[in-house]
Image (cartoon, rainbow, N blue to C red):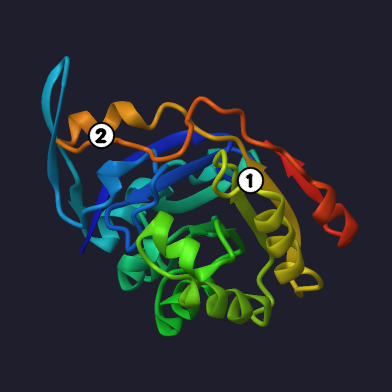
Amino acid sequence: MGIVFDIKEFAVHDGPGIRTTVFLKGCPLRCAWCHNPEGFSPEPQVMTGPAGTRTVGQTYSSDELAARLNQLAEVLQANEGGVTFSGGEPLLQAGFVAEVIDRLDHLHVLLDTCGHASEQDFRLVVSRSDLVFYDLKLMNPVEHRRWTGADNTKILRNLDVLSGMDVPFVVRVPLVPGVTDTDENVAAVAERIRGLPGLRRVDLLPYNKGAGGKYKACGMDFRPSYDESAKPRVNPAPFEGAGIEVHVR
């Protein structure tokens, strides 16, 4: 059994082609800029908004979720798409995700992960995936803990595991003003991923200013300690200098 907080059909920004994206509940990180706070807790929760209250988090068996995803298999395949598992952090429900993948009808599978997981869970899902979106936020472990609630030891270890698994991956860097977009951090990311087997490109992701609205609905406060009004710096030069293809979203 697994708990999902959203399923987005006909998604066009969550991987190649037209996709169905599954958002799984639960995340080991608490990124200060996260725009999916309803994905923090692994349990169903109540959100309250102008339209009233609703429970976020539906329980599925692996058979039930796979059956729903397979309903659109022909459409997804015809449009060179597939299924994306996101969150939250899908690797917190690694066994469930692996079972769902095993039941899919020859669909392209993309894992969208922060990489903060045991190596066993990481290998379990990556080995069943066709493509991985891998988030790298901060290279400095102290700063990583400050802004995400955990250091990056597991993340960097699993990055090395990923590079040896013969599964293509895209590194994604969220550009948070004054936090992840600094010259020092961007250069450190570029140096860390230089020459990694399997790396297809780097995506530099724009800062999402719409994060705050969901927090109130979840009964949480959104109080960023960085200047949310500042424009993030976009500096692809360190990646280009390292011979890495860069996409600015």
**Which residue matches tag 2?**
215
Residue 23 as seen in the image, left or right of residue 203: left
| Quarter residue 2 falls in | bottom left
Q: Choose the circle earlier in sequence order: 2 or 1.
A: 1
Residue 210: x and y, percent?
Answer: 41, 26
Q: Secondary structure at mark 1?
A: loop
Q: Position of residue 202 (x, y in %)?
A: 72, 53
**Which corner quadrant holds the N terminus?**
bottom left
- Which sits in the foreground, 233 or 12? 233
Using the image, tell me which numbered label, if any, was put on residue 181.
1
198 or 37, nearer to the observer: 37
Q: Secondary structure at mark 2?
A: helix
Residue 161 shown left or right of residue 55 in the figure: right
The amino acid pointed to by label 1 is Asp
Q: Quadrant of residue 36?
A: top left
Residue drawn at 60 percent across, 35 percent down:
206
Quadrant of the drawing holding the C terminus: top right
Residue visible at 27% across and 52% down in the picture: 40
What is the three-letter code of the residue carrying label 2? Tyr
